[in-house]
Amino acid sequence: MATLREIQALVHGVLRRETALDAGALALGVRADRLGIYRGFVAQHVTGILAKLYPTVRALVGEAAWDELALAFFREVPARSWELNACAEPFAAWLDGRVGDGGLHPFLVPLAQVEWEQFAVALAPVEIPDPAGLDRLVLNPTTSALALPYPVVRFLVDRGDDVAALSPATPMPDPGDEVALLFRRHGTHHVGYHQAGDDLLFALKVVAEGVPLVAAADLARVPVARGEAALRRAVAIGLLLGPVESALG
């Protein structure tokens, strides 16, 4: 008689598709069709989460190739958390190991990083203070910065939210360094993403170092009016919170 550990190992092999369904059902003494239902559930939990969290990668890969890719990820990266969404977190790193395999473009890796970070920032257990109650400028506490080797934000902005218009025939961008800033807007779970251009980097520097705008503009050798515009833009998009006037002194 098989031990409990042996039965668990056999079931694990069947569910992860490492053991043939018919052979596993015979060894367990159950019907293959009934066991197959559970095997399908387990795989679909992971592949379904991938499809939900990486829609742009999925569209660029194409349905047929995506199905194979998602199933390969399921086989090779065992779920290690009771929280289903967490099963998809290693996808970008796993994808990086398959670049060039089957024609996968390296742009898909930083794109996957951004798509995961959008989800992580949206559900980050961080309270965003009400800007109306602040007497000084502060950084949005949900802000995440990603250093990327491709202009992912520019690609996403240029194409809007029309994922359905993307396909494997969509041209991929050329390599180019980019810092992506992602943050959740106050009062919503909407996550904005922006390129960290000179204006936003200037605004972050003012807040991070607590330097008055006039002094910061002088150090950066930019006109004060341009520096103020950078602060106002950072507040308008939700990257900074609080009154711009607090930094004008």
Image: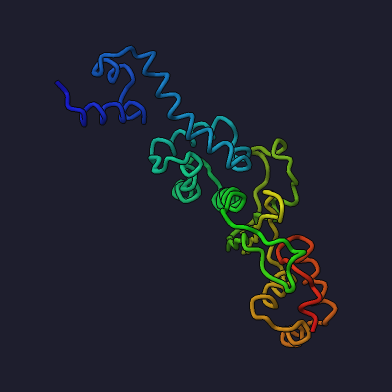
Residue 197 quadrant: bottom right
User: What residue is at 59 percent from the left and 42 percent from the top?
Assistant: 57
Residue 104 against residue 141 in the figure, above or below = above
Q: Is residue 91 above or below residue 247?
A: above
Q: Residue at x 45, y 47 (%)?
A: 94
Q: Is residue 132 left or right of residue 65?
A: right
Q: Residue furthest front?
A: 133
From this viewpoint, which residue is outermost toward the left?
A: 1
Residue closest to the eye, 179 or 177 = 179
Q: Relative to the observer, which residue lies in front, 115 or 64?
A: 115
- Which residue: 71% across, 55% down? 185
Quadrant of the rendered image containing residue 74: top left
Q: Is residue 176 visible?
A: no
Q: Quarter of the image holding residue 13? A: top left
Would you say residue 218 is visible in this rendering?
yes
Residue at the extreme right: 225
Q: Position of residue 154 (x, y in %)?
A: 71, 56
Q: Is residue 57 left or right of residue 92?
A: right
Residue at screen point 53% across, 44% down: 104
Check the image and report above or below for 89 versus 147: above
Colouring style: rainbow
Name the side, left or right, on which 46 lies relative to 2: right
Q: Quadrant of the N terminus?
A: top left
Could you tell me residue 156's position as x and y percent? 70, 50
Along the viewing direction, whichever of 179 and 213 lies nearer the viewer? 213
Q: Count the marks.
A: 0
Quarter of the image for the C terminus: give it. Answer: bottom right
